[in-house]
Image (tube, coloured by chain):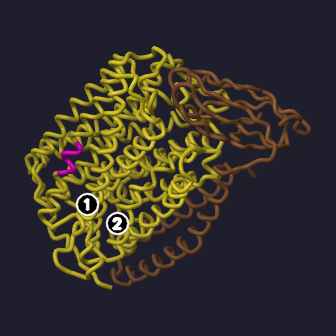
């Protein structure tokens, strides 16, 4: 299951659960009761929800941050220097090999761009920003051979939507450093 | 538990600037409809049902984004002023001055975008305004940024007036946040929820506008003297600190309609408790610090700031969910009310706020952001939050005023239910697009993406019709509203 699907399912479940609570409140609102016991129950629920969010959710958020791409290192990666221009990508190589890390050194010659790698099925598999004056190192391992597209994911002017390049990913071991 | 109860004694709000509140709300309603039509036009273009020049698409995208942020602030200001002025003496000339300045800025932006051809998006990321490959002239970029600066100055003056009023009435912004109760257990002059919200708005918006003014002036200097360059990463940080904090603050302005009207509708009080105050103090800090979640794909950022962006975004959701959300549900639960248009709009607003936060928190997780940043998941979040959270708050106040501030239930709420259903359909298409990796801000979509654009267009048309009914309900009653004042 892709990260996108996990994110979408979690979002859907959370919104449905929340919606169910709202529907219940709406459904029972006509049945007037004293506020004090209702409020007491609400305070108890609040306490439980608070501690669940803190004791369960917060550690998950902190642990998930460990899965960040910022300090990624790869032994003997294949290196691709990528520079964004209005409105094209300049890649110093357009073929890499699947199964071994590729280090994209991404920058821009003019304005901000977004370097988004899409697989043959049109799914976004990795990205970083391309910013003038900075080089962002994105390390990615292509799981499968095929033709991947690089789409611009940061609005950069009038031909932003046509700023597309191709990367061919071949089978086999990497043959260069 | 130490409680200080704010009793909702008055049945009407003695606001001192009713004329301006009405004018703000009327302007918000009309501009909102125009901006919605612009949004529909963009969705129709992405759906393949229109074939516009991409240059015009991006100009309209810039107008739509900038305009929506502007009227979110204008409408939020109207709601907050209306309710705050019952607790704090405010000088209504400030509302007039801000409105005049706002109009000047709007005219400048419209001329720059529609006549000058500026299409740098509402984010105006440096150095795009100055680097368009001839798509727009420098004067258009300068006029757009200058218009934003003028509007920002107007709202800064407005914020300073809020600060003055709160300090004069409560003795300081800390007391406006209820710190004397929270930290010293003092029961004297405990601020009601509206004042607490206004204090957050004052602090957050003032700082956001100062940051925005700084980056706007820097960008204007760069336009005039291209040799004077800006660090793009610094500019991006300033822009998102300004942009995120400013738009986020608008819902904290508008939430006051929930705090004020639900107690009147249900006859139950909304207490200023220590938990409430702690939540709002936490929110004040979080709203100002979560903006790095917009820069999670800028790997050159310090890693600790990225951690702040992810983890604080999660923490920021907690007070929203458990204090305002649960508080509203508790007040409504088994309250004996009969649902009508106003109460249902308020219920939808609280749901929209709480539910709209969820996709944002998930996307603020770096591992998710790596494959969903700048897809349509992002507009999915903020359209959810604004369309189903913020706007129903505006509509609730509009209808409430149109009914002479009488909270006796009347009529049905079918239009509100339809608005919710169609709104959910509309924002779901953005979210599904994000799930399918559709990039945001593309003038032309691939054929395989267009089915969601087409469904979204139909839903958007329905949302616009319903919005028009809410706005019209208010507009036709304006003479009576002013007479009643």
Q: Which residues are magenta?
A: B155-160
Residue ID at (44%, 47%): B418
On screen, B85 above or below A102? below
Chain label for disc 1 = B
Above or below, B287 relative to B60: below
Q: Quadrant of residue B29?
A: top left
Q: Which residue is mark 2?
A: B280
Q: Which chain is brown?
A: A
> Who's the residue at 21% across and 81% down the image?
B186
Q: Is residue B230 visible?
A: yes
Residue B50 placement (x, y as % from top left): 52, 20
Residue B411 appearing in the image: no
Where is residue B38? Give x, y as percent: 41, 29
Query: Alpha carbon of mark 1 to alpha carbon of mark 2: how far?
Result: 9 Å
What number is the disc on residue B199?
A: 1
* Chain letter for the part of the structure drawn in yellow: B
Label 2: chain? B
């Amino acid at each position: 299951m892709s990260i996108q699907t996990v994110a979408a399912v979690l979002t859907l479940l959370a919104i449905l659960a929340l919606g169910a609570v709202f529907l219940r409140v709406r459904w029972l609102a006509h049945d007037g009761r004293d506020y004090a016991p209702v409020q007491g129950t609400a305070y108890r629920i609040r306490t439980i929800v608070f501690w669940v969010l803190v004791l369960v959710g917060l550690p998950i958020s902190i642990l998930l941050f460990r899965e960040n791409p910022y300090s990624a290192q790869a032994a003997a990666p294949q290196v691709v220097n990528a520079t964004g221009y209005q409105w094209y990508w300049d890649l110093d190589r357009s073929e890499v090999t699947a199964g071994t890390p590729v280090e994209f050194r991404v920058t821009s010659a003019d304005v901000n761009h977004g370097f988004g790698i899409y697989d043959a099925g049109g799914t976004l598999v990795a990205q970083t920003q391309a910013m003038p004056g900075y080089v962002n190192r994105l390390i990615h391992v292509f799981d499968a051979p095929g033709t991947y597209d690089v789409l611009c994911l940061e609005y950069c002017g009038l031909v932003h939507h046509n700023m597309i390049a191709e990367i061919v990913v071949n089978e086999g071991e990497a043959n260069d450093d | 538990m130490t409680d200080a109860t704010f009793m909702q004694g008055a049945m009407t709000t003695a606001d001192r600037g009713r004329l301006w509140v009405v004018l703000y709300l009327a302007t918000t309603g009309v501009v909102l409809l125009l901006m919605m039509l612009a949004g529909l036009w963009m969705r129709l273009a992405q759906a393949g049902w229109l074939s516009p020049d991409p240059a015009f698409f991006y100009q309209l995208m810039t107008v739509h984004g900038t305009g929506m942020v502007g009227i979110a602030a204008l409408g939020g200001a109207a709601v907050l002023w209306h309710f705050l002025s019952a607790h704090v003496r405010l000088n209504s000339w400030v509302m007039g001055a801000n409105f005049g300045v706002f109009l000047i800025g709007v005219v400048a932006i419209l001329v720059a975008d529609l006549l000058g051809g500026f299409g740098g998006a509402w984010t105006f990321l440096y150095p795009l305004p100055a680097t368009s490959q001839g798509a727009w002239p420098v004067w258009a970029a300068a006029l757009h940024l200058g218009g934003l600066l003028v509007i920002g100055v107007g709202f800064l003056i407005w914020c300073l007036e809020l600060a003055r009023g709160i300090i004069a009435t409560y003795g300081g912004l800390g007391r406006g946040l209820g710190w004397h109760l929270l930290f010293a257990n003092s029961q004297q002059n405990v601020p009601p929820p509206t004042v607490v919200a206004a204090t957050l708005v004052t602090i957050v918006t003032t700082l956001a506008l100062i940051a925005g003014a700084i980056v706007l002036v820097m960008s204007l200097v760069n336009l005039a003297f291209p040799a004077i360059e800006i660090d793009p990463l610094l500019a991006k940080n300033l822009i998102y600190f300004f942009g995120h904090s400013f738009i986020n603050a608008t819902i904290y302005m508008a939430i006051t309609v929930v705090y004020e009207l639900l107690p009147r509708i249900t006859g139950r009080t909304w207490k200023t408790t220590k938990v409430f105050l702690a939540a709002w103090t936490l929110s004040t800090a979080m709203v100002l610090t979560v903006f790095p979640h917009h820069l999670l794909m800028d790997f050159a950022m310090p890693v600790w700031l990225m951690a702040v962006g992810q983890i604080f975004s999660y923490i920021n959701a907690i007070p929203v969910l458990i204090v305002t959300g649960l508080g509203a549900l508790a007040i409504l639960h088994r309250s004996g009310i009969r649902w009508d248009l106003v109460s249902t709009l308020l219920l939808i607003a609280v749901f929209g706020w709480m539910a709209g936060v969820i996709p944002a928190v998930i996307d603020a997780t770096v591992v998710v952001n790596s494959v969903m940043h700048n897809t349509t998941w992002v507009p999915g979040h903020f359209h959810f939050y604004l369309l189903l959270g913020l706007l129903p708050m505006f509509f609730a106040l509009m209808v409430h005023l149109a009914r002479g501030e009488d909270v006796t239930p009347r009529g049905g709420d079918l239009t509100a239910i339809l608005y919710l259903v169609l709104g959910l359909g509309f924002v779901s298409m953005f979210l599904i697009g994000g799930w399918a990796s559709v990039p945001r801000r593309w003038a032309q979509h691939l054929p395989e993406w267009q089915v969601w654009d087409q469904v979204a267009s139909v839903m958007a048309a329905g949302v616009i019709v319903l919005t028009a009914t809410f706005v019209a309900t208010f507009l036709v009653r304006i003479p009576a509203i002013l007479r009643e004042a």
